[in-house]
Image: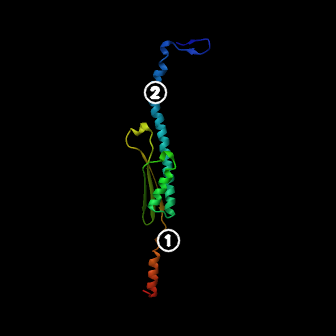
Amino acid sequence: MKKKIDNGYAALKREDLGQALVEFVLIAPMLLIIICGVLQLALFCHANLLVHMAVRQAAEVYLQGGSRQVIRDEVVRFLEQYPFMEGRIVSVRLDTSTLMATVAVECEVPVVPPIRMMGRRPTVKASMSLGREIFDISRLPPLELLNLFRKLLRGEV
């Protein structure tokens, strides 16, 4: 099949010249799917990491006394620092009970175009639960109520 030519390279016969092109055409769709899958996995893992970091940031804002709106704004601001996370749908939830506070963030993952056609977009979720202090300063009654109680005890009312 191959014959030796004077510069040392093997030359193919005329009927073998298109074989590599046919093999490439057969393999190219599988290679494209694998490459898109690897890129999507990288985007998913990076978005997962960023959402976990955003939950940590939200918990820190909550511990500093931030309201629900401040926590949501902080999470959105944190995620928009990264170009591929801009414009994503973000859901921030703060659930509080007597002894626990839970901050949860859910965010849409960016997808590569071939995977976008497959239907529903994936999301990543992360949450962090924090123990609340029983004797926290925020649980004290308002100062006006304490002053009224003091006046009642003194008999001024």
Instruction: Work out whether residue 135 can be spotted.
Output: no
Which residue occupies 57% across, 15% down? 10
Q: Nearer the viewer, residue 67 or 127?
A: 67
Instruction: Work out whether residue 100 can be spotted.
Output: yes
Q: Nearer the viewer, residue 77 or 91?
A: 77
Which residue occupies 45% across, 25% down? 25
Name the side, left or right, on which 93 lies relative to 7. left
Vertical side of 123 occupied by 37: above or below: above
Q: Position of residue 100 (x, y in %)?
A: 45, 63
The residue that mark 2 highlights is 27
Q: Position of residue 65 (x, y in %)?
A: 49, 64
Which residue occupies 49% across, 38% down? 39
**The residue tagged with tag 2: helix, strand or loop?**
helix
Q: Position of residue 9 (x, y in %)?
A: 59, 16
Which residue occupies 46% across, 28% down? 28
The residue that mark 1 highlights is 137
Vertical side of 130 occupied by 51: above or below: above
The amino acid at mark 1 is Ile
The image quarter containing residue 156 is: bottom left
Name the side, left or right, on which 11 lies relative to 151. right
Q: CA distance from mark 1 to mark 2?
A: 66 Å
The amino acid at mark 2 is Ile
Q: Quadrant of the C terminus?
A: bottom left
Q: Nearer the viewer, residue 13 or 134?
A: 13
Q: Nearer the viewer, residue 128 or 22?
A: 22
Q: Could you classify mark 2 by the number of other residues whose Cα lies within 10 Å: few (under 14), some (14-19), or many (20 or more)?
A: few
